[in-house]
Image (cartoon, rainbow, N blue to C red):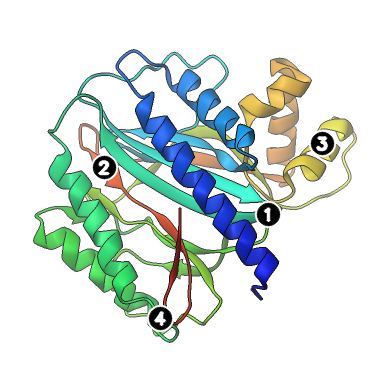
Amino acid sequence: MALNRDILAKYKKASEISKKVKTFGKSISKPGVSYLELSEKIEAKTRELGADLAFPANISVNDVAAHYCATHNDKNVLKKGDLVKLDVGIQIDGYIVDSAISFGIETKEHDKMIKTARSALDNAIKILKPGVKVSNIGAQIETTIEKAGFKVIKNLSGHGLDQYVVHAGYNIPNYDNKSNETLKKGDVIAIEPFVTNGRGGVKEGPSSSIYELHQTKPVRMYKEILKHIVETYKTLPFSERELQKTFGPLKTRLALGTFVKAGILHDHKVLLEEKGSHVAQFEHTIIIDDKPIILG
């Protein structure tokens, strides 16, 4: 991606908003707070601060590794002892900052795992420069996590980013995958180590209620909903909950089912570690330069 001064300014503004949103989200995460309330407040804060969503707020707790998005009637609440991963996507004109933090709810039980995830990210960032192999990034992450006595989740990875595209180009592994692929100056990537005391791999669970446009094609029904999706979200992920605010629960559910079956939308799944385990995650977006520009 060619980065001029205006684009860089948008990334930096999105980064500042991302930091504020994560701090805000953590500050209101208390026992008894519902996932729905937390998500709605985080998403509202993002817009209040002058940005928009690159994807819905992800509130993934304990053995849920990623992609949990509150539904409109979600009954889950935070509990004392929970390990929360808050993953937020902030965008300005499609320029995305994807970042995540982990924290415990009124507990220090998970502090070592949380610190390990943070250290793995920091150690990976230290070696970033044009020409570095993505496998070397993964090796830094893997070594940090294993030295601390935990496992890395090998089938979750970081990724490249582009305008209005959350997952583009590069796969940034969390272990040494022996790839010879290298980063270039101007690349925008997200690095996101996942640390666990579980099996070290995730499986797909139920629908996350997060959808993403895969392709457009003529439809006989729900044309106005597809038009709204294309115009409002473009190629960015969105939540069923958000769409329901415009079209209502029943019509939205029927339309989404139709579009997934037709191959128009991709239905993202909740990603689950071993039951009873815990997962911690940290993530930054980084622009590759002689000195990396860390966002979020």
Residue, disc 2: 279
Residue positioned 48% across, 78% down in the render: 289
Decide which of tag 1 and tag 4 comes sooner along the chain: 1
Q: Gap in Å between the C-alphas at discs 1 and 4?
A: 25 Å
Q: Amino acid at mark 1?
A: Gly
Q: Gap in Å between the C-alphas at discs 3 and 4?
A: 40 Å
**Label 1: how many Cα within 10 Å (few below 14, some 14–19, many 20+):** many
Residue positioned 42% across, 77% down in the render: 291
Residue, disc 4: 129
Q: Is residue 203 left or right of residue 79?
A: right
- Number of numbered discs: 4
Residue 255, image quadrant:
top right
Q: Is residue 80 left or right of residue 98?
A: left
Q: Gap in Å between the C-alphas at discs 4 and 2?
A: 29 Å
Decide which of tag 3 and tag 4 comes sooner along the chain: 4
Q: Amino acid at mark 2?
A: Val
Report x, y in % for residue 283. Answer: 38, 53
Residue, disc 1: 94
Decide which of tag 3 and tag 1 comes sooner along the chain: 1
SS of the residue under disc 3: helix
Q: Gap in Å between the C-alphas at discs 1 and 2?
A: 29 Å
Report x, y in % for residue 253. Answer: 68, 24
Q: Is residue 172 left or right of residue 46?
A: left
Q: Gap in Å between the C-alphas at discs 3 and 1?
A: 17 Å
Q: Which mark is residue 228?
A: 3
Residue positioned 87% across, 39% down in the render: 219
Instruction: Using the image as rendered, state which of residue 98 and residue 239 is in the foreground.
Output: 98
